[in-house]
Image: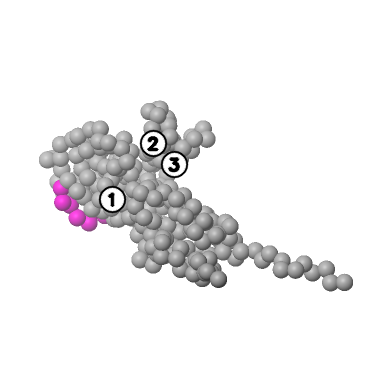
Amino acid sequence: MDQTPQNPEVPDPGEMILIDKPLTWTSFDVVKKLKWGCKFKKIGHAGTLDPLATGLLILCTGRMTKQIDSYQAQEKEYEGTLVLGKTTPSVDLETDFDQEFLTDHITEEALSDAARQLTGTLQQQPPIYSAIRVDGERLYKKARRGESVEIKPREVTVSLFEITTANFPEIYFRIVCTKGTYVRSLVRDFGKLLNSGAYLSTLRRTRIGTYRVDDAHQLEDFIQKKRAELGLDHTP
């Protein structure tokens, strides 16, 4: 007698998806939207983007989730805008301004020198408003309660910190760096090197390894296309 099971479940081979993360969405928001919108059983992302950042997010489904670490380890490229003369506790616009500084003394030569000092292998102090876990809790939760936490520096490599346009107090930049680099920390340290303050006003991840945001899907467009492929919106 044939004991072969009927319609055995075939393991999902999975896929790698490039998404242009929308502004104000968390990376986990994108994962949840795709999971439920496309009925993926297993999905994860390869490298967090802050809610106020946009750009390339790599996601893997099914068996491809085993490749997440390899995608996370690849070089990242960012373009953004920092503003001199003010600071916020989160080093971006998530929190209110807390200090102001003069910027009259800052020259374009000083900008180039500060960027040069933040290029190479660095011991970087992550921002307290970050998703790093300390004692099992995300740092940003401790920061919002006003708790003081000791954060250990981590070694990162910045292979490029380029000032593309200086339109004081706004400075436009491009950065190429390794996994684990916090652009907000670079912006914070950039301001300190200039004896000023600085905060990040815009940030866009343009590349991970050889994958570019120009090749990424808009989130809603991808979901619509995938649902059509799966027949999820078909009305009998």
Q: For this view, does 142 lie left or right of residue 164? A: right
Neighbours of disc 3 within 10 Å: few (<14), some (14-19), many (20+): some
Of 100 and 114, nearer the camera is 100
The residue that label 2 is drawn on is 128
> Which residue sits at x=37%, y=53%?
177
Q: Percent x, y for residue 97?
A: 25, 36
Amino acid type shown at disc 3: Ala
Magenta: predominant secondary structure element?
strand
> Which residue sits at x=52%, y=69%?
234
The residue that label 3 is drawn on is 131
Q: Quadrant of residue 65?
A: bottom right
Amino acid type shown at disc 1: Thr
Distance of mark 3 from mark 1, alpha carbons?
19 Å
> Which residue sits at x=23%, y=33%?
99
Q: Percent x, y for residue 92?
A: 30, 42
The residue that label 1 is drawn on is 202
Q: Could one spot residue 68 in this view of the protein?
A: no
Residue 104's place in the image compared with 16, above or below, is above
Between discs 2 and 1, the one toward the N terminus: 2
Q: Is residue 230 magenta?
A: no
Q: Are marks 2 and 1 in contact (CB under 8 Å)?
A: no
Of 221 and 12, nearer the camera is 221
